[in-house]
Amino acid sequence: DAGVTQSPTHLIKTRGQQVTLRCSPKSGHDTVSWYQQALGQGPQFIFQYYEEEERQRGNFPDRFSGHQFPNYSSELNVNALLLGDSALYLCASSLAASGTYNEQFFGPGTRLTVL
Amino acid sequence: GQQVMQIPQYQHVQEGEDFTTYCNSSTTLSNIQWYKQRPGGHPVFLIQLVKSGEVKKQKRLTFQFGEAKKNSSLHITATQTTDVGTYFCAKGGGFKTIFGAGTRLFVKA
């Protein structure tokens, strides 16, 4: 039973560039959430995707966008990168049918460095 | 900013000592979750508490949800070096999960 996978593991970009991060949820899960975790901080919610739609968004600018595919995998896109976007980007999957029991399974993350 | 406050920020203990981290909210919580993140790793779900006054145990870990559902605690009895990491509480609201800043636990053998 595959867990949550993310790619790439590490990425180095320069300011102004664009980046795409990828996530495959745990087998059987249909919901994907993305988080940004700066060093020494807790994960910050970016958005959640379910049925290929963004159904809730955190306090992140429109430079952050996403997509969910029919196979439930997801992408996070960040445009016009800023130095402050350097962080660990975590994907978490869950099962919508579990209702208010919100056990999320996190992937290993993508470490993004913006120079 | 964070909507759940965690204290302390850091805790150094000798192996075998107990450890407690606290999570507080200014508003009533529908639920509280706890996660553990090992150094260099990713958060791992430990438990979710829903009921007022709820207490749950997992081996040496004891989780409590306050009567007013505005605070929670995680207590580890007789810490081991394998307990090292950052413990986060997180509140659920709609489809969004809000994490606290975490308490980082250091255990000296």
Image (tube, coloured by chain):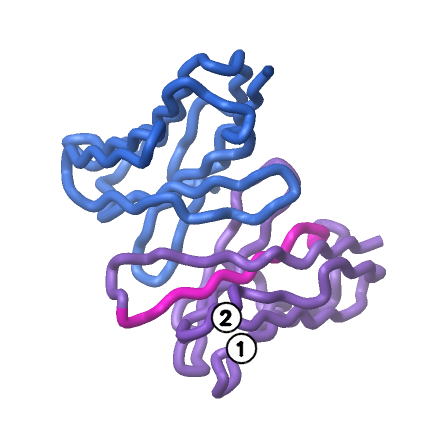
- Asked if A47 appears above or below B91 in the picture, the reply is below
Q: Which residues are magenta?
A: A85-97
Q: Determine which residue is flagged by label 2.
A: A25
Looking at the image, is A52 positioned above or below residue B96?
A: below
Q: Is residue A94 magenta?
A: yes
Of the pair A38 and B74, the residue shown nearer to us? B74
Asked if residue A100 lies left or right of residue A115, the reply is: left
**Vertically, is A76 above or below B63?**
below
- Look at 52% across and 68% down and name the residue there: A2
Going by the numbered disc 1, the residue's amino acid type is Ser
Q: Amino acid at mark 2?
A: Pro
Q: Using the image as rendered, state which of residue B55 and residue B99 is in the foreground.
A: B55
Q: Residue at x 59, y 15 (%)?
A: B109
- Which hue is chain A drawn in? purple
Q: Are marks 2 and 1 in contact (CB under 8 Å)?
A: yes
Give the x, y percent position of residue A112: 73, 56
Mark drawn on residue B8 = none
Estimate the spatial distance between the alpha carbons at disc 2 and disc 1, rounded to whole Å.
Answer: 6 Å
Residue A41, percent from left and from top:
57, 39
Indicate left or right for A59 with A16 as reference: left
In the figure, is residue A87 to the left or right of B60? Answer: right
Decide which of tag 2 and tag 1 comes sooner along the chain: 2
Left or right position of A101 against A103? left
Figure quadrant of residue B34 = top left
Magenta-span inclusion, residue A33: no
**Magenta stretch mostly in which secondary structure?**
strand
In this view, the residue in front, B91 or B87, is B87
Q: Secondary structure at mark 1?
A: loop
* Chain where mark 2 sits: A
Task: Provide the residue designation for mark 1.
Answer: A73
Supply the letter of whichever chain is blue: B
